[in-house]
Image (spheres, rainbow, N blue to C red):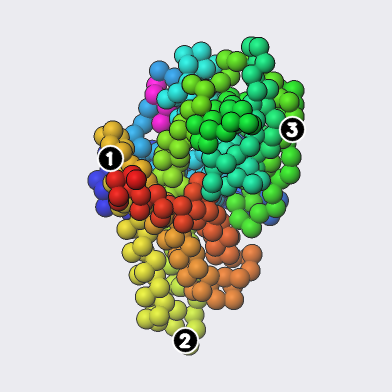
Amino acid sequence: MSLTPLTEVQREIRSLARTFAADAIAPHAARWDREACFPVAVARQMGALGFLGMLIPEEFDGLGLDTTSYLLALEEISAADASAAVLMSVHNSLPTQMLLHFGSDEQRDHYLKPMARGELLGAFALSEPESGSDASSLTCQAIREGDEWVISGTKSWVTSGSFADVIMVMARTDSPDARRGSKGISAFIVTPDRPGFHVGKKEDKMGLRASPTVQLNFDGLRLPSRNLLGEEGQGFVYAMRSLDNGRLGIAAQALGIARAALDASLAYAAERRQFKQAIREFQAIQFKLADMASRIESARALLHATAAAKDRGESITMYGSMCKLLASETAMFVTTEAVQIFGGYGYVKEYPAEKYFRDAKITEIYEGTSEIQRVVIARELYGGK
């Protein structure tokens, strides 16, 4: 459901995503979760259908769609499996958008076009073991040596980092003796074939278990100078601008999880009988379902309005943070209520409620915690100061 009128193209995109999710993702999601493994072949299928190049203009082999179409598709994928959705979200909103807006013509031809087609999968590496919410405190170092950059350091929490083909890496290019804070950070295009590239620890996570989250270690990794993205010292700016878009994707992912939990709760409440009637007849259950649905619709309305503002060229920094904050907290509320509606069955893996609950929590944490979103919103209320 959507209160915002959808165009024919948007309805077709949503229908295509829903069909693909139902056929290729949903039947396998529980097994992928148990095995903590996501088939790369499915990601390639997503690329072949255009889901990995939705926001990339046609001149770079993308679909050139509006933001609402992308978010509609992402919600459908997430409702089937949030692990598949996070791959789609990161790829569409971070590495590809950085290449599109800040890359050279050569970089767009070499990397962006095959990424739009899903032939190359993207990842984004900003956080480090000691650098999370305070992202500008990162220490991964890049040193210029002639026509090459030499990168040393460790990146953490890299989604799809174990199989990505193109990784956008933030590293310091200022001197260790004269740090310049966020102005000393640059962005680099890293590929796993470079000597010195190592995939490190894979995190054993509570949720999104099918999506690999890994450390990446760079041991004197050498890159040609042409792999610097945009201008030296502007990497942090590029990353923050891309995260504005990324937060819309996480909001859509959160809504997909919440919607799936509501749908499962509606079906269970109609089937489960206690005291000689379906539990949907009890006012306590009805109130839970009403609150769940109301919060989902409210978060979706804000998300789609923000997407429209983005496509009009307006700044969405504050509203993007509002979207992520509201949608992620909605996902946690709805999945918590779903577990309660399922009762004891909500606590066992035979039923889907516990997976939705586990998957929902991370949406309050990554790409900026709920606390960071509140900081951003408050600053914007004071004019960005």
Sequence-wise, the earlier of marks 2 and 3 is 3
The residue at 47%/70% (across/down) is 337
Label 2 sits on what residue type?
Lys
Badge number at residue 309: 1
Residue 214 location, x and y as percent?
A: 67, 42
Provide the secondary structure element on which disc 1 rests. Answer: helix
Counting other residues with Cα less than 10 Å from the Cα at mark 1, is it few (<14), some (14-19), or many (20 or more)? some
Decide whether the magenta segment is chiefly helix, strand or loop: loop
Q: In what quadrant of the picture does the C terminus appear?
A: top left
Badge number at residue 276: 2
The residue at 64%/31% (across/down) is 176
Going by the picture, which residue comes out furthest to the front?
Answer: 177
Q: Range of the magenta residues?
A: 53-58
Task: Report the Cα–Cα distance between label 1 and label 2.
Answer: 50 Å
Counting other residues with Cα less than 10 Å from the Cα at mark 2, is it few (<14), some (14-19), or many (20 or more)? few
Provide the secondary structure element on which disc 3 rests. Answer: strand
Q: Compared with residue 346, is residue 153 higher up or lower down, i.e. above or below?
A: above
Counting other residues with Cα less than 10 Å from the Cα at mark 3, is it few (<14), some (14-19), or many (20 or more)? some
Label 1 sits on what residue type?
Ala
Provide the secondary structure element on which disc 2 rests. Answer: loop
Badge number at residue 198: 3
